[in-house]
Amino acid sequence: MGRFWAAIQFLTIVPAPGGGPPAHGAVFFPLIGALLGLAAGGTRVLAGKWFPAPIAALLALGVLITLTGALHEDGLADVFDAFRAGRSPERIQAILKDSRIGVYGAVALVMTLLLRWQAIAFLQVGAIPVLVGATAASRGAMVVFAYASRPAGDGLGKAFCQGLRRTDAGAAALHSAAALLLLNRSLNAVAALAGNALAVAAARAYFHRRAGGITGDCIGAVCQISETLTLLILLCPLST
């Protein structure tokens, strides 16, 4: 149970007993992601009975952001501020440590929030399986990305990368893929899985080339990109 609590402590604001280093709970990341998606999807379905779709979707997104403490949104904004063209690895690391949000970070944050909001607004009775699949896949993508990458600098990201075990990374990948494919049995789910694999590989190559490795902010950014990408692909009319 300690590993389960460690995953809750890292991925949510929910108080949890015990726990430990974030990497200790990596195998449970897709499960915690699925529970987050269940909360957001349930909110979308219930709120949709009384409110128009855009309002219900905004409430669902608000639940998701609140439960996670906007941790990954913060990482996304920091990454887009830091990785502007022409910046040295040292300058990138300095900006990542700055808590202020610049124009690039703000634009990236607004774009992903709008895309997720609009995607959720289009979901009706399928809101729960789609959101559960997307949040499980994105949390699994975090683990695979961190395991496949080398850390740059110090901090929580380095500790997470170095603490991951191959078995935990493999199990997280399998669990997230199973959640995505079993809950969304369509060509879209297969495409979303392939899209996540490509996104993780591309992000790893980019961050290694630009900064020599990854930080905790990079892991959070990959989570947000994966979640947004999965929602968009699951909404595409591929199966028809």
Image (cartoon, rainbow, N blue to C red):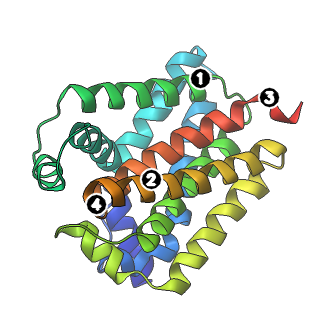
Question: In this view of the protein, can residue 100 be seen by the observer?
Answer: yes
Q: Which mark is residue 216?
A: 4
Residue placed farthest to the front in the image?
86
Q: Nearer the viewer, mark 1 or mark 3?
A: 3
State which tag comes first along the sequence, 1 or 3. 1
Q: Earlier in the sequence, mark 2 or mark 4?
A: 2
**Secondary element type, mark 2:** helix
What residue lies at 32% left-to-right and 43% top-to-bottom?
76
Q: CA distance from mark 1 to mark 3?
A: 16 Å
Q: Position of residue 137 (x, y in %)?
A: 59, 56
Point out the frontmost of discs 3 and 2: 2
Q: Report the residue marked by disc 2.
A: 203
Bin the neighbour count of mark 1 within 10 Å (Cα to Cα): few under 14, some 14-19, many 20 and up.
Answer: many
Instruction: Indicate the secondary structure of the residue bearing disc 3.
Output: helix
Residue 4 position (above or below residue 35)? below
Sooner in the amino-acid sequence: mark 1 or mark 2: 1
In the picture of the structure, the residue carrying the numbered disc 3 is 237
Q: Residue at x 37, y 48 (%)?
A: 221
Residue receiving disc 1 = 121
Cβ atoms at labels 2 and 4 below 8 Å apart: no
Disc 2 marks a residue whose amino acid type is Ala
Amino acid type assigned to the residue bearing label 4 in the image: Gly
Closest to the observer, 190 or 41 = 190
Which image quarter holds the N terminus? bottom left
**Measured Cα–Cα span from mark 3 to mark 4:** 34 Å
Residue located at (39% from left, 74% from top): 5
Query: Looking at numbered disc 1 in the image, what kind of residue is underneath it?
Result: Ala
CA gap between label 3 and label 2 equals 26 Å
